[in-house]
Image (cartoon, grey):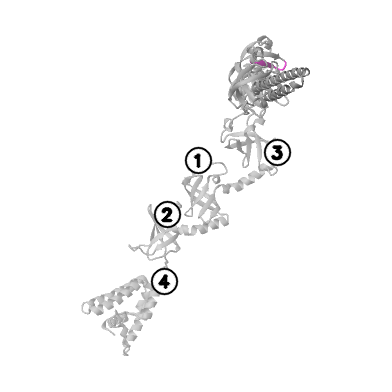
Amino acid sequence: MSDKEKKVADAEANAPVEEVKETAQPEAAEAKAEEVKEEVVAEEETKEVVAEETEAAVEEKAEVAEEAPEVVAEEAPEVVAEEVKEEKSNEPAEFDWEALGKKQDGYSTEERDKLESLYGNTLSSIVEHEVIDGTVVSISSREVVVNIGYKSDGVIPFNEFRYNPDLKAGDTVEIYVENQEDSSGQMVLSHKKARILKSWDRINAAYDNDEIINGFVKCRTKGGLIVDVFGIEAFLPGSQIDVKPIRDYDIYVEKTMEFKVVKINHEYKNVVVSHKALIEDELEQQKAEIIAKLEKGQVLEGTVKNITSYGVFIDLGGVDGLIHITDLSWGRINHPEEVVELDQKLKVVILDFDDNKKRIALGLKQLTPHPWDSLDENLKVGDKVKGKVVVLADYGAFIEIAAGVEGLIHVSEMSWSQHLRTAQDFLKVGDEVEAVILTLDREERRMSLGMKQLMPDPWSNIRDRYPVNSKHKATVRNFTNFGIFVEIEEGVDGLIHISDLSWSKKIKHPAEFTKIGEEIEVMVLDVDEENRRLSLGHKQLEENPWDVFETVFTVGSVHQGTVISANDKGAVVSLPYGVEGFAPMRHLKKEDGSTVKGDETIDFKVIEFSKDNKKIILSHTRLFEEDQRAAKVRTAEKAKSDAQSSKRAVRKVNEKLEKTTLGDLGVLANLKSEIEKEEKKNN
């Protein structure tokens, strides 16, 4: 045993055991440890190596005494006793070669393990990256001090607790241990991370158990609000804030409210909460009571909940109904906002509801008398009324005489004109018009009106203003295959037949002669006042040229003409004076065997003329066929005359033969041969 060990053992042995037991208080243990430490320090000056070992042992005992004074006090007598026994033993201890040159420890391995276990039991076991409970020690404006049972307290920023304004010292909070000791020796804790780690478990539990939870409304976003629930940002849709439509979301920002979890998306870590669900249960009971009492014709009071282009939704105290735009007013309106406004209280009547009473049709105008019932009883057909154009259609215009009382002016009653037009050509919405009542049905609540009746009928004295053979100017309005419809004045139309357009030209379609919208001169041919029809003509304005053509284009006369069109049957030929003729195909053959072609100018012979039918038949072939026929006639006539001359000569010869003798026979034979030769030449 070394000197140091002996002195320590002697010091400990000299301390009475009973005294240690009686004074097993922290102060006594500390005083004893200090005395031992002073003795060791005194010897440290002379024996440096021994002093270092002794100092280490004494300091270790002193630390044990400071951290756990009671335990040291209780165990001190036993330790002293054991050391005294070892000192009295004269048996040398076994030399530990492995400890040679190493720092010597004053405690055995068993003693050291025992002391370490005693010291470790006084501290909490802290594991990093786990969530534990801690106790709030103090709170300041910037930080919160939390005790987690470790050798030192932790500090957490105060903003991590802003969701809990009621936090106070002594409260238990969840703490996440990020690091037991940072570079400055402080623990790194987080309350926010602890909440996030456990928040999903809490949210799932709240969703499964239909639990009511608290949340802090952080800010407004598109379509709703962002709510802090257990440290997780959840979405509160605008439709789930309240049973009534909320138009200003900002009033809920930075408020703590109660919610229910209505939807969780684990894949995207999304949570949807609802405040409306908390009050719906109560409203469902009210709604059931209201629906059970619904009856058609019942009058209820409600509040305008929402306005759309097609109607108004009314809150009847937990159940909604719809007033269609047509049931808001007896008169026509363009939008429900012209009649009602949001949050306005109204009395409405129940018009209808389905079997399940989920759709309720309401009415507002039904609470006031129908305007037709208060219509002037003296109003009758033929009376003049004034009104405003409220609706325009192609077929007519609806005129509002009074609120809810309308009449229709058909487009045919807007003007005396017979041309098809639309109501937009005469009126526009908002115009103030005057009209005459044409029909009135109070039972069916229908009325037809007319505007043209306020103007004189142009057909009333038509014969005086447009007598037969009178000349006028008209406007072309429409074409048909058989003629042209023209308008002489508003409401007075007439027809020019296609055959009355031109004396000389054959017109297949009126579009070849004029255009729509052009002005044309006409002559009245006939007046049908009963059917409101005028028969008009254009060619009658000029003298009939066929009277002159009859003397010019006589049968057999030859004229130069130009082929303007041709087909399988023949060709149309333009002749002088603007008249046209027709040449059949067999009369278009030329002398050389070819056929007359289009646009070719050549002589034609008139072979037929009809004044009544205005028809001229021409032929080019006849021109050379007659010359050939005349030549043949002339040749035939000459041959005939020559033959007759020969016959006469033969007859004379025969007469002379009777007087001749046999001596003259040779002469006669020669004469006969000469005559035969001459006949051959002539043939």
The amino acid on which the numbered mark 4 sits, given as a three-letter code, is Asn
The residue at which mark 3 appears reads as 295
Mark 2 vs mark 1, CA separation in Å = 29 Å
Of mark 1 and mark 3, the one earlier in the sequence is 1
Residue name at image x 44 percent, y 64 percent: 130
- Helix or strand or loop: what does disc 4 sit on? loop
> Is the residue under label 1 in contact with that under label 2 (CB below 8 Å)?
no
The correct choice, above or below, for 676 with respect to 536 in the image is below
Label 1 packing within 10 angstroms: few (<14), some (14-19), many (20+): few
Of mark 1 and mark 4, the one earlier in the sequence is 4
Label 4 packing within 10 angstroms: few (<14), some (14-19), many (20+): few
The residue at which mark 4 appears reads as 121
Foreground residue among 443 and 353: 443
> Is the residue under label 2 in contact with that under label 4 (CB below 8 Å)?
no
The amino acid on which the numbered mark 3 sits, given as a three-letter code, is Glu
Query: Looking at the image, is mark 4 or mark 2 nearer the viewer?
Result: 2
Mark 4 vs mark 2, CA separation in Å = 32 Å
Quadrant the C terminus occupies: top right
Magenta span of residues: 530-538
Of mark 4 and mark 3, the one earlier in the sequence is 4
Label 3 packing within 10 angstroms: few (<14), some (14-19), many (20+): few
Residue name at image x 49 percent, y 57 percent: 199
Question: Horizontal placement of 209 versus 30: left or right?
Answer: right
